[in-house]
Image (cartoon, grey):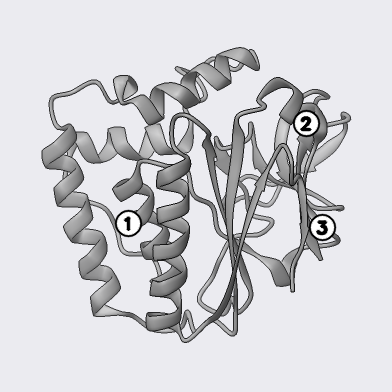
Amino acid sequence: MGFTVDSELFAQFPELCFGLVVARNVNNEGESAVLRELLMAQVEATHRELAGSNVRHHPRIAAWREAFRKLDYNPNRFPPSIEALAKRIAKRAQFPSINKVVDLVNSLSLKYVLPMGAHDLDKIEGDMQVRFTNGGEVFTPFGGEERERVEAGEVVYTDDEEICTRRWVWRQGERSKVEPASKTILFPIDGFYGVSEEEVRAAREELAALLTEHTGAQVSTYWLDVDHPAVEFT
């Protein structure tokens, strides 16, 4: 099993980079007071930083809005996930605790102002891919049961069977969501050289360390860019 990025995407965004963490033997059952408090502290810190501001102007959010425009996605209608998260916290310093892994992803996503995903690899068929759709692929919205068909030309996270995240980093679906029983998890962190590569590397390393400490996971880290567009998980 591996992770591949379509050369067509790099042709449009040669500055694109990905930090990956693969965690195995994750203990995501029960609660962690430490991770819950980490999330709450970061929510409060982000609220203090962003309250009263226009989060769209944050340089790492603005870069995603520009990327979406380049792909003809209206970022006002389809905001990048990090924008939606930051905007919510800027308005109100409250956010629910979900489970250990999701709490950790949300806290680090806010800390580094980056879109971060989490996909249960035991639910994945074949490789995880970031590519343009061919047309006719299916997607099940988060919390839903009915599949929807996706037109050609949309950037998605997908496996061989179903789309996992639509419009690149807009909305993750039901396909690979992380639940308390999830044991093997892929965490992709998307960024751009010249804008956020340092934050992507820092978030990757902190995520790996915290997963090891608080979930007992064995972790591997990877880096993808235009010169290294694919990796096999070891």
The earlier-in-sequence mark between 2 and 3 is 3
Q: Where does residue 222 sit, x and y in percent of width and height? A: 63, 60
Residue matched to label 2: 150
Say if 112 sits above or below 15 in the image: below
Q: Where does residue 3 sit, x and y in percent of width and height? A: 75, 55
Q: CA distance from mark 2 to mark 1?
A: 31 Å
Residue matched to label 1: 107
Q: Where does residue 18 sit, x and y in percent of width and height? A: 60, 46
The earlier-in-sequence mark between 2 and 1 is 1
Residue matched to label 3: 127
Among the 4 quarters of the image, the one containing residue 72: top right
Instruction: Identify the residue at the far front of this view.
Output: 227
Q: CA distance from mark 2 to mark 3?
A: 19 Å
Bin the neighbour count of mark 3 within 10 Å (Cα to Cα): few under 14, some 14-19, many 20 and up. Answer: some
Q: Nearer the viewer, mark 2 or mark 1?
A: 1
Along the line of sight, which residue is nearer the eye, 214 or 165? 214
Look at label 3 and name its amino acid. Asp
